[in-house]
Amino acid sequence: DRMKQAVSRTRENLSESIGSVIALTREVDESTLIDLEPLLLAADLGGETTAIVLEHLRQRALRTGIDGGADLKRLLKSELKAILDGVEVPIQHPVSGPEVIMMVGVNGTGKTTTSGKLANLFTTQGKSVLLCAADTFRAAAIEQLQVWADRSGVAIIKTKQGGDPSAALYDACTASKARNIDILIADTAGRLHTKTDLMKELDKMRRTVEKLIPGGPHQTLLVMDATTGQNGMQQARLFTEAAKVTGIVLTKLDGTAKGGIVLAIATELKLPVVYAGTGEKIEDLIPFDSSSFIDSLLD
Ligand code: GDP
């Protein structure tokens, strides 16, 4: 299955190393947990998540005991699932009118690619989609989005490079209403300038949408590159402080052994991963299911 394939490198890294600890374990004690710690950190779960998980397992071992490796694995799975379940929120789709999805994040994370993949996904689900090229800063971002739009036969609203992203968004919102569009996806600029500039720019775009589309933007998806690890977490924090991010798209999950970042995102950013990028092709995007993610990591 696609999730299993997407996390295969992380699984090799985590499952096999943990597997060796678990295979050796008859009775789980402090030394088992000490062995486990670097393995969780190596998979990019982050210090906070690792500490929480180990503490819960420690308490469990003291309270009722943990009966060997299989029991340890089962408990670890349920701990990790609980962390992801804790940040899960149902998506609020509008009752009528276009649903607006803003794509934000640092350049190079895969924002434009993901915008194109999402447009394609929704189109195959029978929805009418409009793309908005509001990344007017990065050279080639507009042409790149046009290519994705052509591939899935989706219309696109764009201005020239250097133009005002909010103006493009204004046109896109107006067009979405006039054309009865189901979903408007806006690809925004991801230059990392100062936090105040970033806030101002994202705020201006948000207000533009709010004025034209009731309840919008409905989703603000922060695109994160799974291969960038703790550095990516730092950049993500800046965006969550600047915009009302509702969920994460985690790209390049196919290229990393550090898929455990999903858990660091839940613990440290308190956000769910809603989609995962699993390659460079248009169909390489999967709706993220946290339960099957954990099952795929540790089976
Ligand atoms: P942007 O600057 O954030 O808009 O990033 P782009 O969409 O231009 O993507 C940057 C690079 O990452 C491109 O070469 C994409 O093909 C690649 N990319 C995006 N998503 C994925 C993914 O899920 N897996 C892999 N392997 N590559 C990806």
Image: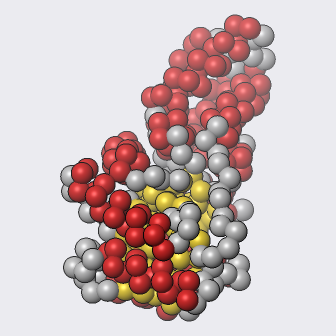
Vertical side of 24 occupied by 133: above or below: below
Front residue of 56/257: it is: 56
Q: Position of residue 238 (x, y in %)?
A: 33, 47
Could you say which quadrant of the image residue 53 lies in? top right
Residue at the spot x=78%, y=17% of the render? 67
Vertical side of 239 occupied by 48: above or below: above
Residue at the spot x=53%, y=72% of the render? 213
Q: Position of residue 90 (x, y in %)?
A: 68, 52
Residue at the spot x=62%, y=86% of the render? 180
Quadrant containing the C terminus is top right
Q: Is residue 169 visible?
A: yes
Q: Position of residue 7 (x, y in %)?
A: 59, 53
Vertical side of 156 occupied by 46: above or below: above
Q: Is residue 35 visible?
A: no
Front residue of 177/55: it is: 177
Residue at the spot x=51%, y=64% of the render? 217
Q: How is the image coloured?
A: secondary structure
